[in-house]
Image (tube, grey):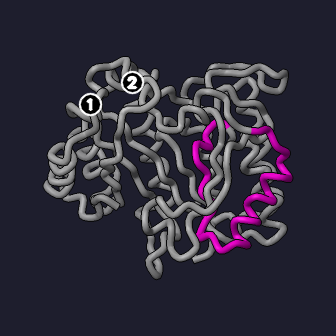
Amino acid sequence: MAPRYLDLPEAELRHRAARLRALASPCRLCPRACGVRREEGELGFCGAPLDPWVASVGPHFGEEKVLIGRGGSGTVFFSGCVLRCLYCQNASISQLGEGEEIAVEDLAQIMLHLQAIGCENVNLVTPTHQAPQIVAALTLAREAGLRIPLVWNCGGYESVEALRLLDGVVDIYMPDFKYGDSAVAATLSAAPDYVERAAEALREMHRQVGDLVVEDGVARRGLLVRHLVLPHRLAGSKAVLSFLAREVSPETFVNVMAQYRPAHRAGERPELARPATRAEHAAALDLARQLGLRRAGAH
């Protein structure tokens, strides 16, 4: 199965990049719609400039097995974030400014390098606020021979308007669905409308790419959802998994994750001070199965 972006004419890809750049100044790339004029050097909630802002690059063998394959998932960790999770394990990158501004041409070369060393895909980690730069770089990389799937690895807090400009560009959407309760999302990630916006975004992602397609053990196209189990049922797993089963698809590929550990500012909240227990994780997995999510598991 060939990447979807190969079917788009070059003029269309350039048009999409231009429209995304227009959404970046005044900025409406994410649901915050903070309106900063990034063309004039203003920085919004995410802190991102208009050049690609990259923290690290390389093959990753700790992602879901269907992304790793034989050559690993070709991760590009972007700096900044549209969320502000108190417990973020990558806070130095997402919130504290670690990273380097590079040229769009350099980002295109990174994509090609990941392909050349055998990575199964280009895995764009925290890409939401850098969508214009990514599509501009993809245009150059495709013309130079890029032929592996593009993974949109995001926090789930997405603008449907921006997502529609990625239709035909992204092969695999891999959003988090972090919370089933907006009050918790406001407290832990500074996103009081997270649940509503994530639900809209996941519906749109599934409309574009459908259920996850796996060929020879490797994901080629579709939706892969991550849900991190938090202690004390803070993630609202019942609401999240019920939504996926009933409003997206019972065939949704869901990674019910047990990796939570207190990090960053988690110590400020007593309820975040311990890892999720095995029993809490097992309860979420059982719930997914009861709801008919046949492809949910600890992937």
Near mark 2 (Cα within 10 A), the count class, few <14, some 14-19 or many ≥20, is many
CB under 8 Å between callouts 2 and 1?
A: yes
- Residue at 44 percent across and 23 percent down: it is 265
Instruction: Return the x and y of residue 133 as percentages of the image width and height.
Output: 76, 44
Near mark 1 (Cα within 10 A), the count class, few <14, some 14-19 or many ≥20, is some
The magenta span reads 100-129
Exactly how many numbered labels are in the figure?
A: 2
Q: Amino acid at mark 2?
A: Leu
| Residue 8 magenta-highlighted | no
- Residue at 51 percent across and 64 percent down: it is 61
Residue furthest bottom in the image = 216
Q: Residue 58 lies in what quarter of the image?
A: bottom right
Q: Which mark is residue 234?
A: 1
Q: Which residue is mark 2?
A: 188
Location of residue 249 with respect to 216 vertically, above or below:
above
Q: Residue 18 lies in what quarter of the image?
A: top right
